[in-house]
Structures are given as C-alpha cells and as structure tokens.
Image: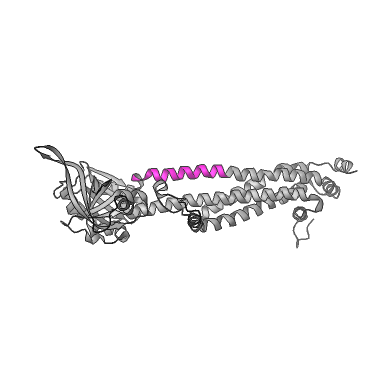
Amino acid sequence: MSDGSRLPYAWWIGARYLRLGRDDRFIGFISAISMAGIAVGVAVLLVVLSVMNGFERELRERILDVTGHATLEGLEGRLDDWRQFIADTTHAPGVVAVAPFVEGRGMLVHGPRSAGVELRGVEPAGERSVSSLGKLVTGGSLEDLEAGAFRIVLGRALAEELGAVPGDRLLLVVAQGNVTPAGVVPRMRRFTVAGVFDAGMYEFDRGLALVNLSDGQKLFRLGDAVTGLRYALVDPYSAPATIRSLAVGLGGGFYVSDWTRRHANFFRSIQVTRSIMFVVLLLVVGVAAFNIVSTLVMVVKEKQGDIAILRTLGSSPAEILRVFIVQGSAIGVVGTAVGLAAGITLALNLTAIVHGLEALLGVTLVDARVYFIGDLPADVRLADVLTVSVTALALGVLSTVYPAWRAARTAPADALRHEI
C-alpha cells in the first residue's frame, strides 16, 4: 500500500481528513477548539513551572548572597577559641573562606519610629569573603564599619520604615540590661547610619542591620568571644555534610547549621506548590486532549462510507485504526507545538510583561512583603519543556484510541447499508 517514496496511505488519508470540506465545518470548529485547549493548557503549565523555577533560583541566590553557606556556633551562644578554629578549618577540603560574626536581637529607634532588628556584627574584609553583602551597599561601604566608630548599615526596607538615611543617628536598644539601683535598664547605644544595602529579599532588607564585630562584642558583652563562624564553600549543596565534617574534626560540641536548613520552609513550599500546580494544570490539558475523542467520534460517523470502501478494497482493521490515530495525533501535536511556543515566549518575557502591567495599571502585582522578592522571575528548563510536551502528546494520542478502535471495527456491509 506504499511505493516507498511516499507516506503509507493510512498516514496520507489521515492527513487528508484534517483538511475538512465545506460540509464538515462543525467538526473543523471542534478540532480547532481541541487544539486551542491543548495549546492554552501547555502554555500555562510551562509558564507556571518556569515561575516556580525562577522563584526557587532567585531565593537561593539572594539567600546565599546574604547568609553564607554554613555556620558553626557555640552551644551556649559563644565561641571563645574562634581564632584557633579559623586556623584549623580555613584550608579544610571544600572551604573557600571563613569569617567570625556576632548576632543578636535589638530594636532601633529614630525619632518617633522604631523597628525590631536582627543585629549582625562582622569584620568588613571577612564578610566580603563569605557573602556578597559588600556589593549591595549604597551610600557607603562595609569598610565604613570601623571598630569603635559605632556605625551601622541598614537594609533598604528597614531604613525606609525608620525614615533613616546615611548620616542619621539611631538609638539601638538590646534586650540584655544593665543592673542599676533603679532596677534593670535596657542596654542602649547611639549608632550612625553608614549605608544601606538592598538584597532584593524583603526578609533581609527589613530585618537585618550590620555593625562592626568589635562593636557587636561590646554591645552584647561577649568580651573577645564571638557568636560563631560563617563559611563559604566550594559547593553550596554540600553544605550540610561539609559543616558536620568540620565540627567533628574540631572535636564536636558545636551547633551547626546551613542555608538549606535555615530556609528549608521556603524551598519546601515552592516544591509542594509546584507539584500541586502541575497536577491541576495537567487536568486542563487532559480535558482539552479528551475533546479529541468527541471530534474523532463525529469524524468516524461521517466517514463510515469511506471506511467501508477502504475495507472492501482490502484495508485491514489495523490500517483503518492508523488512519484515525494519525488524524487525532496531529491535533495533539499542533496544539502542543503552539502551546510550547507561546509558553516559552511568555516565560522569557514575563518580568517585562509584569512590570509593564504594573506601570499601566498603577498597582503592585508582586509585593515583596508577601512573596519575599519584588519581581516575577522565570527560569525555563529543558526538563520541564520535555515533561510537558511528552505528557501532552501522550494524552493526545491516548484520546485517539477509542474512536480509532470503533472505526476499525466498522463492518463494510453495515456501513454501506446505512449509506444507501
């Protein structure tokens, strides 16, 4: 049934049935609706998966810019022999850099405004080696945090809430108090704003402030001790295993943490949301794909005479089956291809589209106070494109099986009797 230079005739007839005539406009309309449904479902599914990927990537990068990869802290909140620990671990396998830090909670007051804050004491040079915070400071630099100068660098959102700009003086109050004849008085100290950093993540921009390590030690009465050590590693994803190995090598007795543990809820919620959205939107693709069933059932009904003639000329049921599988699969292939093209185009331009809509409507569609970041990033991954396309095509082909099977079972005599 094929001369080797052309497609098998079952494929040729199936493709011919896609070019419906004047009397088949309704079937053509249903076919177009099926294609459009598959295209919309595939495009939306791909865009949503890309947004989830983008959120995960942006959160990971911005968290690592601010927090470092892993931390080693004393069980009682202080490390006394931290200089020796730095010497013992600086050149350990997998370690890029290590820096000491002091950490505690406090409250900043500027005129009538106040805000709770996480205070971090750092060495400017060491902080640059374990994080990218130094590159994010504007209106000053980390080097302005000189020991004894009592200067402070604020997150952008925190500075806006306090109404503070570089050069302003703030009152920092910590929970640890001084005992006086009048009772316990909270410990207070005046700090001068040396700069503002913008991490692009609301949690840090609103809740974090930096001071010099020495000033932090004095403020929290640590003497020469620090709260812990922060590490930058060759492979951030090996942080849990690497920091445990370092702690064991130092003899144990430490509290260890890493970026995957401190922010596990962020990434877990993204993965759960991603899985749920994939299933929900896949149902949309499935509904559109199974519209092909109704289309092919009507085509089979309309083409019973053609089927009978083909059977009379010697076509086997398997060849009739292939005719209608080709027709239905073509609908799924075209819908999937259009959906992939539209989805990839939307995902690659999504940030610009959202910013344009925000400017046009005068509203904030992505609020950093709700979504942690102020943009709507998208990261199109080949694995997602392949998963979506293969799944959509599989649903499209599966939906052709029943109508094609009915066509293959059509008896020539019965079909011709109805035609007469």
Q: Residue at x 58, y 44 (%)?
A: 282
Image quadrant containing the N terminus:
bottom right
Determine if residue 185 is in view. yes
Q: Is residue 269 magenta?
A: yes
Highlighted range, magenta: 262-281
The residue lying toward the viewer, choosing from 77 and 157, is 157
Q: Residue at x 63, y 47 (%)?
A: 394
- Extreme right residue here? 420
- Extreme left residue here? 181
Image quadrant containing the C terminus:
top right
Taken as a whole, is the magenta stretch helix, strand or loop?
Answer: helix
Number of numbered labels in the structure image: 0
Q: Position of residue 284 (x, y in %)?
A: 60, 44
Q: Residue at x 51, y 58 (%)?
A: 348
Determine if residue 81 is in view. no
Q: Position of residue 369 (x, y in %)?
A: 39, 47
Q: Position of residue 185 (x, y in %)?
A: 15, 40
Q: Residue at x 16, y 44 (%)?
A: 187
387 shown above or below 184:
below
